[in-house]
Every structure is written in structure tokens, then in C-alpha cells.
Amino acid sequence: MEIIRPEVTTPQEADLAEGKLINSFLETCTGQYPDPDKWLDEEIRRNVLLTTVDAAVAWARQRSIFPLIFGTACCAFEMIAASGPRFDLSRFGMDIIRFSPRQADVMLITGTITWKMATAARMIYDQMPEPKWVIAVGACAISGGTFRESYSVVPGVNHIMPVDVYVPGCPPRPEAMIHGINRLHAKIVKGTIDNPNLALK
């Protein structure tokens, strides 16, 4: 708004003109200008993350799993291939393969388990700290496979320990193992601090 000052000669006329100018200006000021503070709300929404403790712990758990490979047959070679540079298990947070059960989070049973080997497998599982998970890789680990009818073969790892994810195949390709790991991640995310081993839905 351009303010035009009138020509005045005496101080009284100047005061009168100024009063009229102020009154006319007051008549135009009927509302408020909006404050430009939308940027502040957008900045808060962009930089504040609201979550639960369970979600944060589950996110950290799923991306920092230390595997222990319990390989007894040919499926172990496919697991080794999956951890190589072509399939790169490191991108799933599983780059450090542990050979001590006390430092492992997930046990990968790859191959035929005999009853003689079952006691060692169960002892290793019992030595793993909670929370812990088991992935049965291949037909032999899942159901005994080709050797199921043998008196010395365990007809499935779930006879000696709880299994969280099954990866079928004889042997399963590395892509199938990666899919099984993704299923385990989905299971971990659904868990809570009190019950990290919730079943897949």
C-alpha cells in the first residue's frame, strides 16, 4: 500500500492529516497475515521418527544375524555358494559366519542328520544364546530325503530341535536359501522383546 502524505503548512494541520492517515490505514487492516511456518511442520515430520522399542529391536536383530553352518552333505556347498560374492549374503547382515555356537543367532542345518550326529547338533543348538533360530536347508534336513527309510537317519530336523524356516530342494539353489533368509527376517520383525520367536502368519 502506497502512503501519500498530504501537503501541510501548520503543525495542527500536520497532526490532523496524520490522524486521518492512521484511521484510513486502520480500516484496511481487518485481518491477520498467515505466518509462514509450514516449513517448520514439514521439517519436524521429515526428521522425527516415531516407533516402538519392539520395532527398533526387531529391525536391529534382522540385520545383524550371525549364522552357524551345520553342514553335513551337499547342501552345505550351496550355502557356501550363497555366501560368496555372486549372491552376497552380506547385504542381509549375515556376512560373519560363526563357528562357535555362543556367538551365533541362526543355525543352518544343511544336509543329512544321522542319529549319531543328532546329539552333537542338539548340543550346539542348546549352546546358542537366546533368541535363536533354525533354518532347515534341503530335503535331507527337512524330512530325511533320499535316506529317510534308513534306521540311522533322522526323519527331519524338527525331531530334535524347533525349526523356524524350511528351504526345500535337493539341493536348493542359493536363491532359495536367500528366500528362506528373507522369510526368517519377516518372522523376526513380527517378534517382540518378550517373545522374539513368534510364528509366521
Image: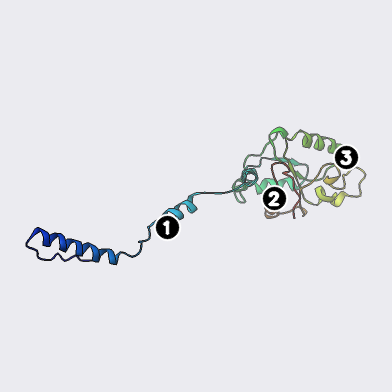
Please name the residue that numbered disc 1 is placed on.
Answer: 38
Answer whether labels 1 and 3 touch (C-beta < 8 Å): no
Q: Which quarter shows the N terminus?
A: bottom left
Secondary structure of residue under mark 1: helix
The quadrant holding residue 2 is bottom left
Q: CA distance from mark 1 to mark 3?
A: 68 Å
Most foreground residue, 148 or 157 = 157
Q: Residue at x 71, y 32 (%)?
A: 102
Which of the two marks, 1 or 2, is nearer to us in this view? Answer: 1
Label ID, residue 138: none
Secondary structure of residue under mark 2: helix
Tag 2 or tag 3, which sits nearer the N-term? Answer: 3
Q: CA distance from mark 1 to mark 2?
A: 36 Å
The quadrant holding residue 90 is top right
Q: Residue at x 66, y 42 (%)?
A: 65
Most foreground residue, 94 or 12 = 12
Tag 3 or tag 1, which sits nearer the N-term? Answer: 1
Instruction: Using a 10 Å C-alpha cutoff, classify the residue at mark 2 as few (fewer than 14 neighbours), some (14 to 19) or many (20 or more).
Output: some
Q: Is residue 123 above or below residue 20?
A: above
Q: Residue at x 85, y 47 (%)?
A: 156
Please name the residue that numbered disc 2 is placed on.
Answer: 190
Q: Is residue 144 above or below residue 27?
A: above
Q: Is residue 47 left or right of 193 when viewed as pictured?
A: left
Which of the two marks, 3 or 2, is nearer to us in this view? Answer: 2
Please name the residue that numbered disc 3 is placed on.
Answer: 115
Q: Is residue 43 left or right of 159 when viewed as pictured?
A: left
